[in-house]
Amino acid sequence: MCSCSRLILLPIACMLASAAPSFSQDAPSNLRPPAGERQLFAAHAKGDQIYTCKSTGAQYAWVLKGPDAKLFNEQGQHIASHYAGPTWEANDHSAVTGRVVASAASPEPKSIPWLLLSAVNHSGSGVMTRVLSVQRLNTNGGAAPAGGCDTAHAGAETRASYTADYRFFGKTE
């Protein structure tokens, strides 16, 4: 439990740390953050993966445009948003953008993969500025459609609903 009276943190940082969802599954070894990083907070995401129908040479395929999701704490409070970049922006307006460094197939059929991402950019001043790595686990849904992308649908967008758990890691002070 976070003791906000003894820590010098923004109120949202304490809310995030004290209300981290519990996770039932451990991450595969290739998705573990670097040594020395500890979990700062976690959240459950609900939203969509947005895909655009694009030409990939001689054929067409659904290509990820980006996510559009909300992140919630254990009490169901909206604490952050997730969008293209991929970027996570907390309610305190701090943000972190990551790049994928490792992936593992989701055990759930038709679900996007589990990921480990490394922070490549930070903005604002708040909880996300301490984040060095992000895990995406326990995905359900979000995979691109199997069909429907062809010359007649070039440029079309589709959304695939998904849920996932995100863990945010950084150096502890």
Image (cartoon, grey):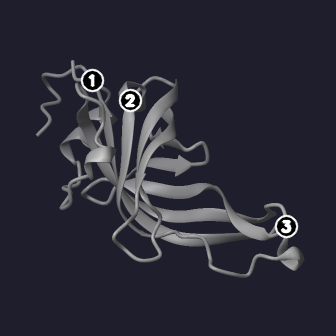
Q: Residues within 10 Å of mark 3 (few under 14, many from 20)?
A: few
Coordinates of residue 78 in the picture (x, y in percent):
40, 53
Amino acid type shown at disc 3: Ala
- For the residues labelled 2 and 1, say whether their Cβ atoms are less than 8 Å apart: yes
Residue 14 placed where, x, y %? 24, 35
* Residue 152 in sight: yes
Q: In which quarter of the image is the N terminus?
A: top left
Q: Nearer the viewer, residue 61 or 125?
A: 61
Q: Which residue is rendered at x = 14% and y = 35% of the image?
A: 2
Q: Residue 58 carries which label?
A: 3
Q: Residue at x 49, y 49 (%)?
A: 81
Q: In the image, residue 59 lies at what x, y percent?
A: 81, 70
Q: Is residue 173 left or right of residue 50?
A: left
Toward the viewer: 104 or 64?
104
Question: Foreground: 30 or 86?
Answer: 30
Q: Distance between the residues labelled 2 and 3?
A: 39 Å
- The image quadrant that residue 17 belongs to is top left
Q: Which disc is residue 132 wearing? A: 2
- Work out whether 146 lies above or below 11: below
- Mark 2 and mark 1 lie on one chain; the one further toward the N terminus is 2
Secondary structure found at label 2: loop
The amino acid on which the numbered mark 2 sits, given as a three-letter code, is Leu
Other residues around mark 2 within 10 Å, as few (<14) / some (14–19) / many (≥20): many
> Which residue has dot 1 on it?
171
